[in-house]
Image (cartoon, rainbow, N blue to C red):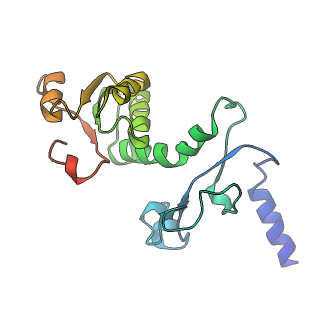
């Protein structure tokens, strides 16, 4: 019957998951049918949102989500905590899209990452270092700056005590940077 065929298709689609396997959720929601979705640019979907934002969910013990939102955690990554896994689909994909998809980061680039203490900022530092870029990052206190250095930042700037643009000019010998990863909003645009 048609129902049996549909069940078989769903079974094949989720066969890469095992019962009790650790998974993480990509919390993005989208229609899956508009031109943006079918071209692989779901983030441009007019209905794009995130679980817990304009769509209920996220702060629960159990929930049902479409299969497309479920990502298996590799078996060899037993060291990955639930918190770390939860950050991958949102902050790492955001930073990856910005650095790789939009900016075309390449080895040797110098990247300014605003907000070393944020999720996107900390992911961006690691991605930039993966591409062998020089990373300059900013934060508002020593603890966040130390975390930025621990993640691989080559230089740090305390944006409450130093002017970002002046420090970048000093660090780069007036050359500037190839990429500014700005995700904090309008208040940082002038310095960016």
In the visual, does 50 lie left or right of 59? left
What residue sits 39% from the left and 40% below the top?
118
Can you say whether 50 is above or below 21 in the image? below
Location of residue 52 in the rendering, given as x and y in whole percent from the top left corner: 53, 61
User: In this orientation, which residue lies closer to the viewer: 105 or 77?
Assistant: 77
Q: In this picture, is 73 found above or below 67?
A: above
Left or right, 165 with respect to 128, comes to left
Q: On the rendered structure, is 131 left or right of 34?
A: left
Q: Position of residue 151 (x, y in %)?
A: 43, 26
**Image location of residue 29, percent across then percent down:** 54, 64
Q: Nearer the viewer, residue 132 or 191?
A: 191
- Which quadrant of the figure contains the N terminus? bottom right
Q: Quadrant of the C terminus?
A: top left
At x 13%, y 22%, the residue is 173
Residue depicted at x 69% and y 54%: 61
Residue 170 lies left or right of residue 10; in this view the side is left
Between 110 and 140, the one nearer to me in the picture: 140
Against 80, residue 91 (above or below) is below
In depth, the one of 118 and 95 nearer the eye is 118
Q: How many badges with numbers are in the image? A: 0
Q: Position of residue 26 (x, y in %)?
A: 57, 53
Give above or below for 167 relative to 35.
above
């Amino acid at each position: 019957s048609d129902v049996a065929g549909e069940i078989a298709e769903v079974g094949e689609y989720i066969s890469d998951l095992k019962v009790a396997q650790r998974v993480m959720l990509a919390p993005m929601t989208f229609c899956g049918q508009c031109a943006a979705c079918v071209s692989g640019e779901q983030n441009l979907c007019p209905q794009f949102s995130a679980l817990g934002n304009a769509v209920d969910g996220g702060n629960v013990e159990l929930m049902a989500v479409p299969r497309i939102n479920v990502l298996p955690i590799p078996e060899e990554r037993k060291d990955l905590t639930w918190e770390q896994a939860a950050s991958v689909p949102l902050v790492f994909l955001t930073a990856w899209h910005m650095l790789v998809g939009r900016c075309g980061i390449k080895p040797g680039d110098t990247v300014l990452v605003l907000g070393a203490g944020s999720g996107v900022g900390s992911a961006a530092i690691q991605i930039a270092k993966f591409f062998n870029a020089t990373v300059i990052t900013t934060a508002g206190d020593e603890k966040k700056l130390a975390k930025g250095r621990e993640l691989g930042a080559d230089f740090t700037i305390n944006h409450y005590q130093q002017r970002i643009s002046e420090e970048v000019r000093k660090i780069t010998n007036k050359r500037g940077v190839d990429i500014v990863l700005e995700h904090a909003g309008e208040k940082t645009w002038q310095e960016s």
